[in-house]
Amino acid sequence: MKDETGAQKPVYILAIETSCDETSAAVVKDGWEVLSNIISSQIETHRAFGGVVPEVASRKHVEVITLIVEEALARAEITPDKLDAVAVTQGPGLVGALLVGVVAAKALALAWNKPLIGTHHIAGHIYAARLVKELEYPALALVASGGHTELVSLESEGRFKIIGRTRDDAVGEAYDKVARALGFPYPGGPHVDKLAHEAAEAAALPRVWLEPDSYDFSLSGLKSAVLNLVNQSRMKGQEPDAAAIARGFQESVVEVLVEKAVRAVRATGARQLLLCGGVAANRGLREALTARCGTEGIELIIPPAVYCTDNAAMIGAAAYTKWLHDGGTPLDMVADPGFSLEHWSV
């Protein structure tokens, strides 16, 4: 954007994220400079239930959303009149949780007379990489989170094509189920990751490659193999070797993710590989992918952990691309738990 003198004018976007169990608001300048990123987590609330309870998550969002937005503006030292747009996660996610953010964003956009930008949650995870470094196209994103495991080709800015996805469990979901079987509390992924690094040996577990030319993933069989090991040990009156199982599980997951991602980079001619989503904070996956990309000569971008888990700064980064190409979203937009990433493309 340019001001009245013709000079380039900064673009300030207030972004809101409420797709699951984090309430977050951020102010992002020009799609990459984070002026504030406030996150209120509900992990302690949902831990008692062993996972996210949608109705509880929605109520918690309602309780804090106004305070989080006010704090984001205060931390950024910006007033509403200086904003260019209000962005919000439109989907995918839990419909009740999404509704809280969408209604709040609509109200603010209407009250402040600002454009509204409905934003795709996975596009946010992908564009979190731009908070680290300028993206070069074509690029390839490996999205690994609690609800998603996908390989996404970015043909150009804001143009997404899903070339591989999970056929059953997502990576984060599988980690949590394995953690529960081993006796760890929610969220279980960090516990499995830590134990895997402490193990002296790995339990023998299968690698699920599917068809030779497929970029899809399947984790339900691996999860079942872990449960069989645990149950067989207990039927013999023995405690399962949790460390060996954790290491075997993690090595199986990581090997398939890394191999398919590298193969997809070669097939698409991608100039960069982006590791995105909450599981991008997993130490085992980060280390293995970093080592393999170093060997293959592939540029790898992994956002800091705070931008891997759900946060509003990533939504602001993705919304900026939509703003440049398509402008705002009509105020009658609706929260969409099954929102298509390819449909959201600019």
Image: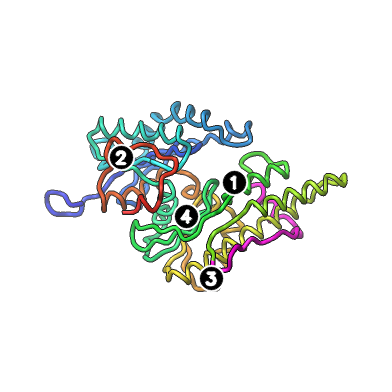
Q: Which residue is tagged 3?
A: 294
Comparing labels 1 and 4, the label whose residue is closer to the camera: 1
State the mark number for residue 218.
none
Residue ID for mark 4 = 303
Residue at the far left in the pictured view: 5
The stretch in magenta equals 190-213
- Look at 58% across and 65% down and name the residue there: 211
User: Which residue has dot 2 on it?
Assistant: 86
- Which residue is disc 1 drawn over? 173
Q: Is residue 62 above or below residue 34?
A: above
- Report which quarter residue 107 is drawn in: top left
Image height of 22 relative to 325, above or below: above
Mark 3 is on which residue type?
A: Gly
Disc nearer the start of the sequence (1/3): 1
Residue count near mark 2 (Cα–Cα under 10 Å), binned few <14, some 14–19, many ≥20 = many
Q: Secondary structure at mark 4?
A: loop
Q: Where's residue 246, x and y in %?
A: 70, 53
Q: CA distance from mark 4 to mark 2?
A: 23 Å
